[in-house]
Amino acid sequence: MRLSDIAFRLYLVALFTFVFLPILTSMVFSLNSDRFPTVPLGEFTTHWYETAFSRPEVWTAFGNSLIVAVCAAALSTALGFVTAYTDFRYGFRFKPAYLALALLPPTIPLVIMGLAMLAWLGRLGISGTLSGIVVAHTVMGAPFAMAICRLRLSQMDPALEAAASNLGASQWRAMRAVVIPFCLPALISSYCLTAAVSFDEFIVAWFVSGLNKTVPVMILEILQGNVDPQINAIGTVVFLTSMALVIVAQFLILRKTNA
């Protein structure tokens, strides 16, 4: 084995250790009987999970996060697909500016995004509601969906739509029978990824959620001035949920890219 291969593998090990070791540590301490994260560990217990999920506000926060993630992911995927298809299918003036604006939200600092959303949603009268959080998370998630759909559409032969038209299909019929089935893996992948982004997002949700707290906002409230192992338990559930969505999304992207 070459020295460069060894160095690359060591780099990957160090990278994954740096990223995942704190998360794994939190998962371990969520099953530890001791209140404080100390070594050696205490006894194995599920007490912190039982305590956390016996609280009505925790279930309410998970319900809010689930509703927001489902709705925001659907809207983000729809907007991302439409934007990506417009880029794929049409040429028009100022197209680079159009694409730059569509991809702009992830480049804006989240604090600035949160303040802007708070002001804008306040003028619309939906600040502090679940609808407001859905709108904010849709703005944040649509560029990710667009990127995934653009990758899939770049693999499609443009002649497929022309062939469908030659066979008598209208533009909408060609969309339903050709384009959407071809993009279905990317659409599912986009939905899973944007749902994970929404489920985990904290800063913007903290600005616009009001009394309708999502899970990350509720975790901050528990954390303030208090070391509570319930945070480890709730965080573990959130992490596993998000990772499951991301793995499904990544599996679909790699499967269809390599096909």
Image (cartoon, rainbow, N blue to C red):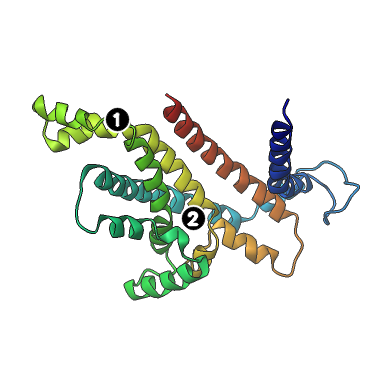
Judging depth in this view, the residue of 109 and 49 nearest the camera is: 109
Determine if residue 53 is in view.
no
| Mark drawn on residue 218 | none
Residue at the disc numbered 2:
64
Q: From the top left corner, tell me how far across and down residue 158 is, in percent.
A: 23, 33
Q: Amino acid at mark 2?
A: Asn
- Element at badge 1? helix
Judging depth in this view, the residue of 45 and 141 nearest the camera is: 141
Q: Quadrant of residue 129?
A: bottom left
Q: From the top left corner, tell me how far across and down residue 227 is, in percent.
A: 77, 62
Distance CA(mark 1)–CA(mark 2) = 31 Å
Q: Amino acid at mark 1?
A: Pro
Judging depth in this view, the residue of 32 and 89 nearest the camera is: 89
In the orientation shown, which residue stands out farthest toward the right? 40
Image-based side of 52 in relation to 43, left or right:
left
- Element at badge 2? helix
In this rendering, the label closer to the viewer, 1 or 2? 1
Q: Residue at 60% x, 55% y: name it.
A: 58
Q: From the top left corner, tell me how far across and down residue 172 is, in percent.
A: 16, 37
Residue at the disc numbered 1:
181
